[in-house]
Image (tube, grey):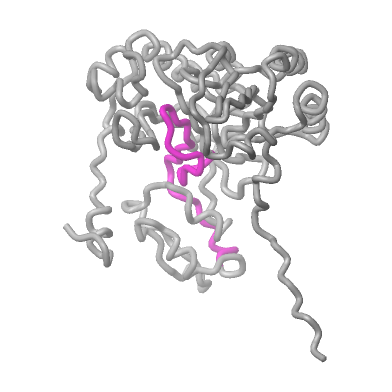
Amino acid sequence: MAEAPRMPIESGCPDPVQYMHPTMRRNYGQWAFHDRPRPGVLHHTSKHNEEIWTVRCGTQRQMDVYTIKKLADIADEFGDGYIRFTIRSNVEFMVDAEAKVNPLIEALESAGFPVGGTGPTVSMISHTQGWLHCDIPGTDASGVVKALMDEMYDEYKKEEMPNRVHMTTSCCQINCGGHGDIAINIQHTKPPKINHDLVANVCERPTVVARCPVAAIRPAMVNGKPTLEVDEKKCICCGACFPPCPPMQINDPENSKIAIWIGGKHSNARSKPSFQKLVAAGLPNNPPRWPEVGAVVKKILAIYKDDARDWERVGEWVERIGWPAFFEKTGLPFTKFHVSDWKGTRHQLNSSAYIRF
């Protein structure tokens, strides 16, 4: 008799319902309303008149096992033993009684985890891995986040902004950090330097050619060796060629800069989703505190806080006052680099099977 077939091992994400607070499981999809009793605390009431409080705290994101264990111990002692990690590296604790909220907040604050990040605040910054893990970083995204959030500690804890401010950082121009109200990205200013002696042994040349978004890379022969060459007139210095071909080095301490973009928005509340737009370029990539970047971000936030109307996101505020007024109010220089005059996209999109002009 044949043996019973072996059942596959589930290797995907586990069902999250099993990790939810019992009150959340019982009332899943049955919430009547919610409110914010104070910054960092969410209060939900279900249609069955059950209540749950969520306390949100910020973390340094890159955590060792001892820090994670400390958070778990706080959840066991002062909460109901349930926590969750958000996409912006916050940690949320759920409790089923209002009396548990203040002791939980005191325990988190005394352990160094600020409570906040709800409503019209500067949320925790979502970011890429940077030097710690990414294979093509031009800067340390985690370090930029730590430096910026140290400067904006109070803005995280106090709900004093016109609306929520989502910030992102990306350690390369692929922008894995995503669009945000304010985005801090690396900006390569020179094409990659190619070590022709290594390309043939290290790189799969067709893959590198195909990876370039503007078709600026093509096969070549140098000193009798197969290699690659870059059309510098086409190159947009994105760095996409570096991961499959490390001999095409683009990171440079002098020519890799920081750029700041604003106005990105994923939601369709009050206005349509929007792409972020460049407002500052060529800022020094100056670890470990990036003071020049922090100064520009704080200036933008201060003007936005004073000038925007209630509920306006950063991009909506700029669209209302106009870009000339934005540059005038912030004092940021408007240069030729703010003008998008690259027309290669039109030709490439015309080659698509889906888009025609």
* Left or right: residue 34 compared with residue 303: right
Rendering coords of residue 152 (x, y %): 55, 15
Asked if residue 292 lies in the magenta stretch, the reply is no
Q: Which residue is at the front of the view, 231 or 34?
A: 34
**Above or below, comparing residue 13 to residue 222 in the picture:** above
| Nearer to us in this view, 18 or 185 | 18
Residue at (57, 43) in percent of width and height: 137
- Magenta stretch: give its range: 171-199
Quadrant of the snapshot with the N terminus: bottom right
- Quarter of the figure that contains the C terminus: bottom left
Return the residue found at the far left: 357
Q: Return the x and y of residue 5 as percentages of the image width and height.
A: 75, 79
Q: Which residue is pictured at 47% across the width and 31% down the height?
A: 184
The residue sitting at the front extreme is: 48
- Horizontal side of 255 relative to 19 (left or right) equals left
Residue 140, visible in the rendered structure: no
- x, y (%) of residue 268? 34, 35
